[in-house]
Amino acid sequence: MANYVLPFEKPILELEQKLTELRGFSEDQKIDMGSEIEKIEKKIKDTKVKIYSGMTAWQKVQMARHPMRPYTRDYIGMMCTDFRELHGDRLYRDDRAIIGGTANFRGRQVMILGTQKGRDTKSNLECNFGCPYPEGYRKALRLMKLANKFGMPILSLIDTPGAFPGLESEERHVAEAIAVNLRESFTFRVPFISAVIGEGGSGGALGIGVSNRILMLEHAYYSVISPEGCAAILWKDRAYADKAAENLNLTAPDLIRLKIADEVISEPLGGAHQNPEQTAENLADALEKHLNQLDALTIEERIEDRYQKFRHIGVYSEEAV
């Protein structure tokens, strides 16, 4: 897992392996190969810049799904203190695909919640691979209502392929659970900020994302459907996922252009997993900035701001035929 390499990163891996071999040969044979080593180091740096600055939409989707990428619990640990996790929806059970609780964020008492994935088979099964059940959304709603009652800002971290679409979800009314979250989120009086830290899949993401501000990490994506799902519908073949990703306009810059996202948060070269602490610092800075802006609004202005944001999503033009 530690050496997990995405397909488009293989040229970098090959150069790094060559550099390791050259250093070993130089040390074993007591030969000064400093100039050759410097050339390869420069080539590695240039190759990284070229690859990571020119990523396609599909490559960004792959990066958003990187198994070493920081998850919600990681960011909570790096950004907050005194986190007190709250469990259960008070109706059915505790869904581990959504975690949340009160915490201290840079001097503020906040309610922070988000979708959670696992690192191995056991933890992935516990949190259902980051796909919440209906009780996960009802737990999130319980926490958000609690925050609204006690005047705590809501911070939501989104990283999910989507809500779990299985029989159990349908039996417990997943569509209704998400719909209630959407409706209630428009009524909250407190500042509400969501950040897409990895995958932002469909209604599963929107269920905890009807907020005043939507932030996105540089290599995250936010889409009404996964590229594979889109490809299966439009081209009857999931192999066209790369083509679907390009057409879905799901990357952070796309969503800024479409006025859906409000800010793109930079990641270290190579992705958030290369320097989680720096990524968390960048994310915290952005959250604090937008919290300050929302704090300056009245309750009525915050509610209207959230309504207008979503009311104006979906710009289109018509042409006479």
Image (cartoon, rainbow, N blue to C red):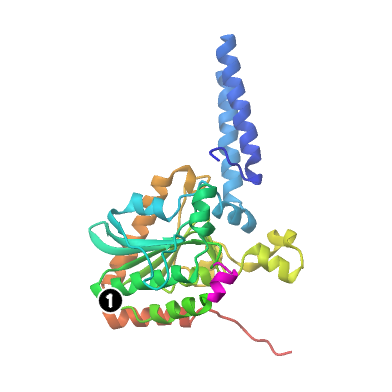
Q: Identify residue type, mark 1.
A: Leu
Residue at left 52%, top 53%?
A: 124
Q: Is residue 193 left or right of residue 227?
A: left
Counting labels gives 1
Residue 269 visible somewhere in the drawing = yes
Magenta residues (range): 164-171
- Return the residue at label 1: 297
Picture coordinates of residue 117 (x, y %)?
49, 55
Quarter of the picture containing the N terminus is top right
Q: Residue furthest right?
A: 236
Judging from the image, what secondary structure is the residue with disc 1 in?
Answer: loop
Q: Would residue 49 be counted in the magenta stretch?
A: no
Residue at left 60%, top 67%?
A: 249
**Which secondary structure is most common in the magenta stretch?**
helix
Residue at left 57%, top 51%?
A: 63
Which of 26/61 is in front?
Answer: 61
Q: Would residue 169 be counted in the magenta stretch?
A: yes
Q: Is residue 135 left or right of residue 191?
A: right
Picture coordinates of residue 85 (x, y %)?
32, 59
Q: Is residue 126 left or right of residue 284?
A: right
